Image (cartoon, rainbow, N blue to C red):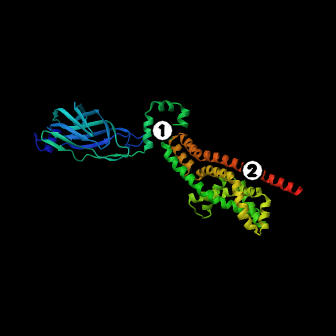
Amino acid sequence: MFFALAVLLCGGPRTACALTVERCTARSNADDETSDVMGGSETRVTWEATLGVDEGLRSLSLTLPENTAYRSADTRVVLLTGRDFMTRTEIGVEVGSKDQTLTLSFPEPINRAGKLNIQIYGVIFPAAGGQMQLTGSETNSAGSKALSDIPAITVVGVSPFEQAAQFLSAQPWVRSWNSNKFLRLFANPMILVTSFPVVLQGFLMSLAIAAISFPLAIPCGLLLAIMRRARSAVLRGIATTYVNIVRGTPMFLQIYIAFFGLPLAGVQVAPFALGIIVMFMNSGAYLCEIFRAGIASIDIGQGEAARSLGMTRSQTMVDVIVPQMFRAVIPNLTNEFILLYKDTSLLAAVGTMELVMYAKTIVANTGSITPYIVAAAFYLVITLPLSKITRHLERRVSSGRTRRHRSNTTASGDSARVAAS
């Protein structure tokens, strides 16, 4: 019956008909349980077409997409025949390869009806992915003809980091490294590479929050410091109460109150903006104490000299005290920025997608602690250079104070000698 159907389809018992392509697929090479075909990673392509009776197939050419690698020597050709195409006959074939074209030449023409199954091994599609369309042609007893209606293969693109991870996974030293449970959990090379671009997004988010919050915290802290030194008891009371409450409660609790309390009160603020608000209001309380100590460190004679020149209290504070105070507290300001940057990690508790939150997401998917190590490295990229700058500034400020003290002592001694003479 199958023979009669094939004869009918081909238009006669001795008339060759073209191949009918049934499928063109690639084996999944994804690390997860999906059926995705990933670019830049080895897979196997299966091409299958229906043969008619007396097809007389002599050769077949398949052209793979540009920049696709493959192993021509491992190509297998099988003819499936029988009622349910369950009879497998491996066909001997001469394989030729030129650029992207694979040519299969059959020593004897194939005249049996069935399905021709071709498997191409070692296929690596371009890493960019996309719709991979194969083309080709056949040569049979009737001549040559292009193959049509070959289904395209959908290939998922991979990033350079994923390609690097695939390369590392094939390295013997990486397999040896990961054989140690501790090293695999805390420093898996593949996860380290693939988590880098994801955690980088969180790093930029944390840096943006700190970079916006800190400049806002400086005027807030300065205003509170001036209020705490004001003559008005009301202003002093407001500033003192605010500073004591903020410094006396954990930032973690303040974040929870802001992110969960305000929505209950009907106040809706975007998480990013709310994170900035909480950060700068908290940092402002600590900067208040830094500025207050800096103002107190300025010699009282500076203010008296300014007022003797007719400057008001406000003018003295703005033009004389504050500029000198800022130079004295620069090291402390740098330290406060480091603390603020690290404290952005607390926003992960409320779902803000910052550095720790991105790392936490990867950890949940992979079960490896490696993304947290990557996150720690991103923190150190900022904190270590700033810590070094802070120590340098502290030495400069300390040496500057020593020089001023010596000059003041010398001036006082000269004045005393002049008065004695």
Residue wearing tag 2: 403
Which secondary structure lies at badge 1?
Answer: helix
Which secondary structure lies at badge 2?
Answer: helix
User: In terms of depth relative to the viewer, which is nearer, 346 or 384?
Assistant: 384
Residue for point 43% across, 37% down? 167
Residue for point 59% across, 55% down? 211
**In the image: residue 44, left or right of residue 49:** right
Indicate the amino acid at tag 1: Met
In the displayed orientation, state which residue is furthest to the right.
Answer: 420
Q: Which mark is residue 412?
A: none
The answer to whether residue 84 is seen in the rendering is no
x then y, percent, for residue 295? 75, 58
Q: Quadrant of the C terminus?
A: bottom right
Image quadrant assignment for residue 74: top left
**In the image: residue 179, left or right of residue 266:** left
Residue wearing tag 1: 190
Q: Nearer the viewer, mark 2 or mark 1?
A: 2
Residue for point 50% across, 37% down? 189
